């Protein structure tokens, strides 16, 4: 593994660049790769200047003549350990949905009804407390999902207070 630092973060395009003093190079890293290297998949923890350990590989994007080295594994050095966090349901489809965490980039995660441990109703705008873990779908694609979900307030309760 190489050691370097985050040079540029583009949350709107979901990528960042890592600078490596060892070989004076910069490497592309997509947020999908970056999620594995931080607690809870919070890519918002990668900031310009953050120290990282990473591995690279040559990506061809289907054309071997345009091969470019890119980050395939990355880990934030001295990353904070996140525990229970607040999230807000942004999409709900009766048995599952997606929540955005209360963080700078509103990092998303999957929420299943079977993960809820308290009484209440989940709907768009519901605030929850949750833990998160890395999982994989049937095709082996990784994603972050909530577990030990506690419903703390519904959208209607938030609207009544405002």
Image (cartoon, rainbow, N blue to C red):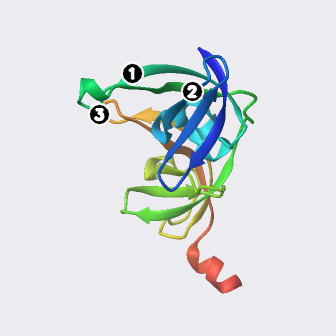
Residue 119, percent from left and from top: 57, 60
Comparing labels 2 and 3, the label whose residue is closer to the camera: 2
Location of mark 1 (residue): 58
For the residues marked 2 and 1, what is the alpha-carbon distance in whole angstroms?
Answer: 15 Å
Q: Nearer the viewer, mark 3 or mark 1?
A: 1
Which residue is nearer to you in this view: 84 or 104? 104
Q: How many other residues sit within 10 Å of disc 3, few (<14), some (14-19) or many (≥20)?
A: few
Lower sequence index among marks 3 and 1: 1
Circles 2 and 3 in contact, beta carbons < 8 Å: no
Which residue position holds label 2?
A: 74
Considering the numbered disc 1 on the image, is that residue within a helix, a strand or a loop? strand
- Spatial CA span between label 2 and label 3: 24 Å
- Kindly identify which residue carries mark 3: 138
At a point 67% along the width and 22% down the height, the residue shown is: 21
Alpha-carbon span between mark 3 and mark 1: 27 Å
Say few, some or many: other residues with alpha carbon within 10 Å of mark 2 (under 14 / 14 to 19 / 20 or more): many
Q: Depth-wise, is mark 2 or mark 1 nearer the camera?
A: 1
Could you say which is closer to the camera, residue 121 or residue 92? 92
Up the image or down, 58 lies above or below 38; here it is above
Describe the element under mark 3 as helix, strand or loop.
loop
> What quarter of the picture does the C terminus occupy?
bottom right
Crowding at label 1, few (<14), some or many (≥20) Cα neighbours within 10 Å?
few
Looking at marks 2 and 1 on the same chain, the residue that comes earlier in the sequence is marked by 1
Left or right of 132 in this view: 145: left
Is disc 2 placed on a helix, strand or loop? strand
Q: Residue at x 65, y 36 (%)?
A: 6
- Indicate the position of residue 105 as horizontal and vertical percent values: 60, 55
Horizontal arrangement in the rendering, residue 129 relative to residue 112 (left or right): right
């Amino acid at each position: 593994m190489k050691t370097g630092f985050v040079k540029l973060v583009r949350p709107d395009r979901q990528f960042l660049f890592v600078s490596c003093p060892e070989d004076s190079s910069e490497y592309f890293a997509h947020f999908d790769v970056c999620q594995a290297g931080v607690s809870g998949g919070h890519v918002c923890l990668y900031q310009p200047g953050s120290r990282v350990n990473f591995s690279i590989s040559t990506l061809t994007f289907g054309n071997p003549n345009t091969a470019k080295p890119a980050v395939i594994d990355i880990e934030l050095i001295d990353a904070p350990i996140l525990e229970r966090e607040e999230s807000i349901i942004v999409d709900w489809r009766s048995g599952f949905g997606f929540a955005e965490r209360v963080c700078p980039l509103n990092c998303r995660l999957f929420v299943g009804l079977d993960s809820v441990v308290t009484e209440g109703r989940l709907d768009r705008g519901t605030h929850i407390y949750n833990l998160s873990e890395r999982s994989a779908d049937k095709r082996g694609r990784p994603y972050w999902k909530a577990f030990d979900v506690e419903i703390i307030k519904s959208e209607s309760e938030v609207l009544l207070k405002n």
